Image (tube, coloured by chain):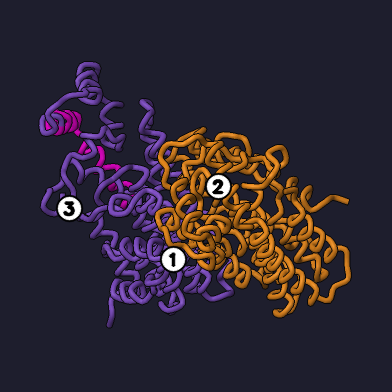
Chain colours: A purple, B orange
Amino acid sequence: MKTHTEIIETALSQINWQQEPYGLYEPIAYTLSSGGKRIRPALVLLGCKLFGGKAEEALPAALAVEVFHNFTLLHDDLMDKADLRRNRPTVHQKWNDNTAILSGDVMQIKAYQLLSQVPEKHLKSVLDLFSTMACEICEGQQYDMDFETREDVSAQEYLEMIRLKTAVLLGTALKIGALIGGADAESQNLLYDFGINIGLAFQLKDDLLDVYGNSDTFGKKIGGDILCNKKTFLLISALQCAEIDIKSELLRWINAKKYNPNEKISAVTNIYNLLKIKELSEDKMDFYYQKALTSLKKIDKNNENWKELHNLATSLMKREI
Amino acid sequence: MKTHTEIIETALSQINWQQEPYGLYEPIAYTLSSGGKRIRPALVLLGCKLFGGKAEEALPAALAVEVFHNFTLLHDDLMDKADLRRNRPTVHQKWNDNTAILSGDVMQIKAYQLLSQVPEKHLKSVLDLFSTMACEICEGQQYDMDFETREDVSAQEYLEMIRLKTAVLLGTALKIGALIGGADAESQNLLYDFGINIGLAFQLKDDLLDVYGNSDTFGKKIGGDILCNKKTFLLISALQCAEIDIKSELLRWINAKKYNPNEKISAVTNIYNLLKIKELSEDKMDFYYQKALTSLKKIDKNNENWKELHNLATSLMKREI
């Protein structure tokens, strides 16, 4: 039997992007072929099958979620001026800024074209869930950019930002799947909450890995967030709980214009260690992970898909530190 | 009785954009408040009423069309690095590039949110018409940008570009209105063809006005297309039909790096006059205008809305040269 990821890869590869004007569609094929774990579309299929629905009925929505997700990466990379994504040049680097803008715009439309293929009785509900999520993701990106120039971001604001930017996509993917699969409203919402809380835990884990990860398995350079002073849960918590002298040292590193990168990473990591920020973040992560599991356990479905969701949640949390 | 434009202005002003994050939603309110003739949403309402439908039922689709149209202007201005739109700074000028990208993205989603409010029995058809149009507009913009670096653009390619970039929006606005108003497929298509041909004639008129317009009434500086060597129907036709010596002179002006702007405008206009490009363009424009009227006349509706469509077509063509 094909795995969900295989079903999605096959379906994605069958979309024809070989059409004119090539300058518009080639960057889309390039973006979608760059791999990724296809977790979000898999959640749509799992959400559907969990309630006895057919994967085929949820497949267009799953593809829409994946195309939309990749669109946000494409435009985010442009806004963040990122050079690489999954070890390949980003679209604005390989082509140019205008191509990144316009190809991204078309990806958004293509996501809606895929979405319109869900069974018609669910179309209006699915469309509204999807659009609400899409707006929220843009709001999350806006807050993320706003935070770059703000010094007073609270942990609560940060958590709200990652809820919007990261978690609602997981929650909505599951909810759309559940809806198509025939779940009642309560079960849809439980699955949504599961997705939201897994999303929050997932991002907190990502922040942790950026500091405490193993560079061989993490896939990114360790300390990237520290070097660009990204206001992660770790930095915000450290600034909040540090006594005056440690706080000054941390602020000195944040405001330093010239420094040795490795020295900065090591100094800030030492401060985090001193303040037990790793433990604090892990506690927060575990809080959301447990919340997620509580929601999942309330869904009374003893089938393979339930177990797969449970395993997925656990494996995301167990990624190697 | 309220005019269509008034209905649209009122409905647009009732959408609440005063929400956080303000950096994301303020530029949308700014873009939508900059006026414009609201022709496209009026076409949705007219298309609906022409077949006896209620304007209220078509209003969400009309607003979706207007929000989408303004989104394309916002992103096009960014890609074209335009400083002004309707005599006000463009969004990327007043805020910055990232704001223009992200606020534009949200506008696209908001257009779909409006669209999802059409009567549910029409939702799937309206959605598919809208998305096809949206892709085509992006394709038109891509061709337009591609043409900037190409020397061999034919008149046919130019007409296909303006069909995509300008005309399909008018055609689809009318067709969506007709569909919601209960028109049969044949009438929907006749109205679509009317919109396409009016759109082509409209853009040819715009190109003409850019050279032969009256700067007081046109609202833009005369000769802008000539100064930036824009490959309009006029320039393409001139290059195609000029004998070798006139063609060399024209190419000299196109390739000149240093020149007096007024001198260039006047020299190129003289070449156009010599080659009777104005008459050629007017003939082409009239060809599409007549084609549009032929389609409209096949729609057997003797009501006020038919007359309003007819008048609109005529008035767009009669804009003062």
**Residue visible at 51% across and 41% down?**
B82
Query: Residue A102: x and y, percent?
Result: 44, 55
Q: Is residue B146 left or right of residue A260?
A: right
**Residue visible at 46% across and 60% down?**
B143
Nearest the eye: A121 or B91: B91
Nearest the eye: A226 or A16: A16
Question: Residue tagged by mark 2?
Answer: B268
- Residue A64 badge: 1
Question: Farthest residue in the front direction?
Answer: B245
Task: Give the magenta part as a residue range.
Answer: A265-290
For label 2, the SS is helix
Q: Amino acid at mark 3?
A: Gly
Q: Is residue A120 left or right of residue A299?
A: right
Q: Main secondary structure of the magenta part?
A: helix
Subunit ID for the residue under disc 2? B
Q: Amino acid at mark 1?
A: Ala
Query: Residue A219: x and y, percent?
Result: 17, 52
Disc 1/disc 3 C-alpha distance (Å): 26 Å
Residue B117 image-quadrant placement: bottom right
